[in-house]
Amino acid sequence: FLNRLFRGGFPVMRVVASLAAAGAAADLWRHLACDVCEQLVAEAREQGGGLDEDETADYVDNICSPKAKQGRWLASLDVVSVNSEKRVGLERHSDVGECRKECRVVARSCSHVLRGKDDVLGELLRDKAGKKKMHKKLCAKVCAASKPFEGDWTDEQFVARDPKEMETEEMMEKMKGLGMPMKMYKREDLEGLTEGDMEVMAAREQLGQERMAAKAERGEL
């Protein structure tokens, strides 16, 4: 592979640097797996309780997806240096940050932690398991396999997201779930709407669609 790259005119040092960076990123998500799992347990115990069967399944499916509301907690985690040692860990911010390189690394680590354990997490949530039991079931193996991180790592500045922007995204998702075509609405149109407002708008939209369908059947369109 390297010979083909070099014959093709790629600078040797650039190729080596790229491969080294890729290797470091791979080591980083593995190194963070134990810390991520402990954060996942805390998050799941706080946010995943009191849900019905379908809600629990949806929660487990999305807990490692930063784009979903259930997985937004991942974007509040910041990869930081620990003590004076060449070691990295996690710091949780009260704000949700923009999901960039570090966020994607943490999300990959989360997916690794839950691989093959989705049903286990769902059962633990339904049983309202304690922290110790959840840690044993979900984190014991990844924490035992954790190794010191020896790669190069460049800190990425944590940038908090605008809460209003996130509220609008949630509202748009809810309206989408009600069957409302979002292309008809601008974000500023949605600010301040309650769930009741959205239900009324959805009912009006549905009524309009039914009237249009009736006119089409009568050949009036």
Image (cartoon, grey):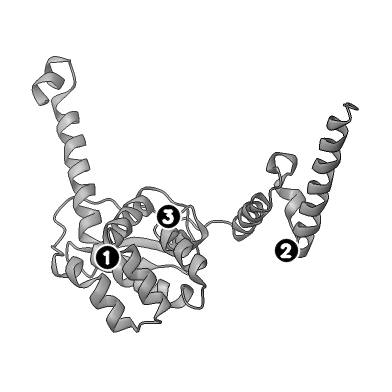
Judging by the rendered image, the residue that carries numbered circle 1 is 89
Rendering quarter of residue 111: bottom left
Q: Nearer the viewer, residue 121 or 171?
A: 121
Q: Secondary structure at mark 3?
A: loop
| Disc 3/disc 1 C-alpha distance (Å) | 20 Å
Residue 194: quarter of image = bottom right
Residue on which the image places disc 3: 65
Residue located 17% across and 68% down the image:
141
Dot 2 alpha-carbon crowd within 10 angstroms: few under 14, some 14 to 19, many 20 or more: few
What amino acid is found at the position of numbered circle 1 in the picture?
Gly
Residue 4: x and y in percent read: 12, 19
Residue plotted at (23% across, 54% down): 28
Local secondary structure at mark 2: helix
Residue type at mark 3: give it: Ser
Residue type, numbered disc 2? Glu
- Vertical placement of 178 versus 85: above or below? above
First of labels 3, 1 by sequence position = 3
Q: Quadrant of the N terminus?
A: top left
* Residue position for label 2: 195
